[in-house]
Amino acid sequence: MTDPAKTNRTLEPDLKRAVELVLQLMPIPGPSGEEGEVSKFVRRELLRAGADAAAVQSDSAHRRTPDGGQTGNLVFTLPGTVRAPRRMLSAHLDTVPICVGSQPFRQDDLIRSANTDTGLGADDRAGVAVILHTALEILRRGLPHPPLTFCWFIQEETGLHGSRCLTRQRLGKPAMAFNWDGGSPAKLTVGATGGYRLGIEVRGLASHAGNAPEWGVSAIAIAALAIASLHRGGWHGDVRKGRQRGTSNVGVIQGGDATNVVTDRVRIRAEARSHQPRFRQRIVAEIEKAFRNAAAEVKNAAGVTGSVQIDGRLDYESYRLHDKEPCVRLAADAVRAIGRQPELAVTNGGLDANWLVKHGISTVSLGCGQLHPHMVSEALCVPDFEDACRVALRLATAVP
């Protein structure tokens, strides 16, 4: 019988095939909600490698997300050949819209898009490729492994909706998970902030801006006063109050059609983040207060004021894993096994891991060489991507 520990010590993935795979994945269009084609590609590759069709299924997450979508999360489960708790490997299928039209090409140790108007899409097609290649290696080479679940999430970029709305029963009760997203393959992200999003509608009163401005109530003026108040009070941007830390941002403002009309409606999208849930709630409360106070301040000649309607939702809750969690120790061992030093990190961004932890699955996130995500200068560092493939194969096959 094959000794799994010995097999793992000498295990090396087919890196040429891995690079070919990521080059195939990055040009496939798949912004959030439109992941259908890339999901079909992953499914097709699994079936070609011998996966049981019944073990490759999409869930119905897209029917529960705010914006719908073409398909749900794609899940592939494998029974173990080695007795051990089930492990899950995950990544997200979607890219940001700027990556549609990517034309990846390799130049030395970097992959970039030949289309200078687009991003590359390495975030997160590199992650998709890492775990897909790991599954293909196990299937083609018959490698011993514990029970495994591979999951490709939808709609990560628009608020972690795929991982939030996943059908947990399809996962096979994994004891731990490893999630591939941006950054270095040696960086183990063991904690992340929580995020809350707000939709704010400011309502004023329209009037002719030249003949009767005094009868109007400017929704733009209300919004401007509220944002200025947040800025002056230290509640916008980098928020620091004593030992409490967080961030907030008014990121979208839409309203107005003409300069000769007092604008009666403005729509705003904002967010608040903090590792401290109570402080994040305080930031949200300050944002809401600023807009309500501003609406009461702006009046027309008859004393009529504006109003605001505020809707909000928790996008993801913060988490922090203990350094001695089994998934943290296994990830660190896998990084050391390829000759690199693991670096524990906590991020101010959101990850699918936020929701996996909320669902009761301890999750470490690792990078796979993406550089400058969400930008036209995005690139993929090939040696880091290859190391990520090495780490993933070890995590999928190593048994203590």
Image: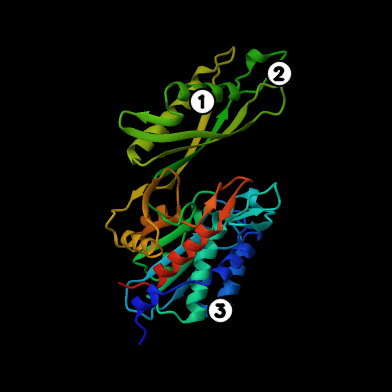
The answer to which quarter of the image holds residue 215 is top right
* Three-letter amino acid code of the residue under disc 1: Ile
Tag shown at residue 227: 1
Q: What is the CA distance from the residue labelled 3 to the residue labelled 2?
A: 68 Å
Give the quarter of the figure containing the N terminus.
Answer: bottom left
Going 44% across and 41% down the picture, which residue do you hit? 196
Residue 87 in the image, given as x and y percentages of width and height: 38, 68
Residue found 50% across the figure and 75% down from its top: 137
* Residue at the spot of label 3: 49
Which residue appears at 52% of the width and 68% of the height?
132
Of the residues tagged 1 and 3, which is closer to the observer? Answer: 3
- Coloring scheme used: rainbow
Q: Earlier in the sequence, mark 3 or mark 2?
A: 3
Q: Which residue is mark 2?
A: 208
* Viewer-proximal residue among 76 and 217: 76
Q: CA distance from mark 1 to mark 3?
A: 55 Å
Quadrant for residue 17, please give it: bottom right
- Pointer 3 and pointer 2: residues touching (CB < 8 Å)? no
Front tag of 2 and 1: 1
Rendered location of residue 147, percent (x, y)? 39, 75
Residue type at mark 3: give it.
Ala
Tag 3 or tag 1, which sits nearer the N-term? 3
Using the numbered discs, state the Cα–Cα distance from disc 2 to disc 1 in whole angstroms: 25 Å
